[in-house]
Structures are given as structure tokens and as C-alpha cells.
Image (spheres, rainbow, N blue to C red):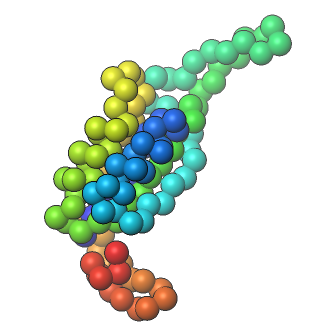
Amino acid sequence: MKLVTAIIKPFKLDDVREALSEIGIAGVTVTEVKGFGRQKGHTELYRGAEYVVDFLPKVKLEVAVADKAVEQVIEAVIKTANTGKIGDGKIFVSPLEQVIRIRTGEVGEDAL
């Protein structure tokens, strides 16, 4: 089992969620986050004063999947979150040692 974590632009969230639903992914955890990479933020003008926005708003998706579904999830996220511009985000894949469904006590892939 793997944990696929994707950091994407907020306006792409609905598209990515629909793409994951289409390939049979039933559960996704979404967190609003802020950060920067190569974009390094930007400057904005507010009431005549210029200020630097160091951290940009992003959305973090976390999806626990069986090993056989990892490539499908990655492809779906890349296809739908890509705008071709800097700041599209990143995908991280980590191993999951154990998953337990609290309600039923199911363990492993059965708990997904």
C-alpha cells in the first residue's frame, strides 16, 4: 500500500477529485496549505502599499491506495492538475505499513 500526496493549485481541486472518482478512488483527504517552491511568492499592491506574499495558497491531497493503483492515481493527478505553468505542484509517494478501518477493524487493503 502507498500514500500518494499531491500538492496542487486550489482551482484544480474539483477536476482532480472527479478524475480520481472516475478511476475508483473512494477516499481523499484534502488540506488547505501554504508554501513556495521555485515560484518564491510574488508582490501585491494593497491600498497603495506593495507587499510580498512569500507563501502561496495550495491544496494538499492525500490518497491511500493499493500498490496496483498507484500509477493510475499519479496519471490522473498529472493529467488534471497540469496547467503547464510554474507552481503546478508536486506528487510524493510513500509506503504505508498498515491501514485500519476504525469502525469495522478491517486491516490492510480491505480497510481502504
| Residue 66, percent from left and from top | 24, 68
What residue is rendered at 30% in x and 69% in y?
A: 96
- The answer to whether 42 appears left or right of 51 in the picture is left
Of residues 110 and 49, which is closer to you in this image? 110
* Vertical side of 48 occupied by 19: above or below: below
Of residues 40 and 32, which is closer to you in this image? 32
Quadrant housing residue 85: top left
Could you tell me which quadrant the N terminus lies in?
bottom left
What residue is rendered at 83% in x and 13% in y?
A: 47
Residue found at the very far left of the displayed protein: 68
Residue found at the very far front of the displayed protein: 22
Q: How many marks?
A: 0
Residue found at the very far bottom of the displayed protein: 105
Of residues 11 and 99, which is closer to you in this image? 11
Of residues 43 and 28, which is closer to you in this image? 28
| Residue 62, percent from left and from top | 42, 57
- The answer to whether 14 appears left or right of 93 in the picture is right
Q: Does any portion of residue 35 appear in the rendered image?
A: no
- The answer to whether 68 appears left or right of 7 in the picture is left
Residue found at the very far top of the displayed protein: 48
Q: Does any portion of residue 70 appear in the rendered image?
A: yes
| Residue 14, percent from left and from top | 48, 45
What residue is rendered at 42% in x and 28% in y?
A: 87
| Residue 16, percent from left and from top | 40, 45
* Vertical side of 33 occupied by 86: above or below: above
What residue is rendered at 57% in x and 47% in y?
A: 32
Could you tell me which quadrant the C terminus lies in?
bottom left
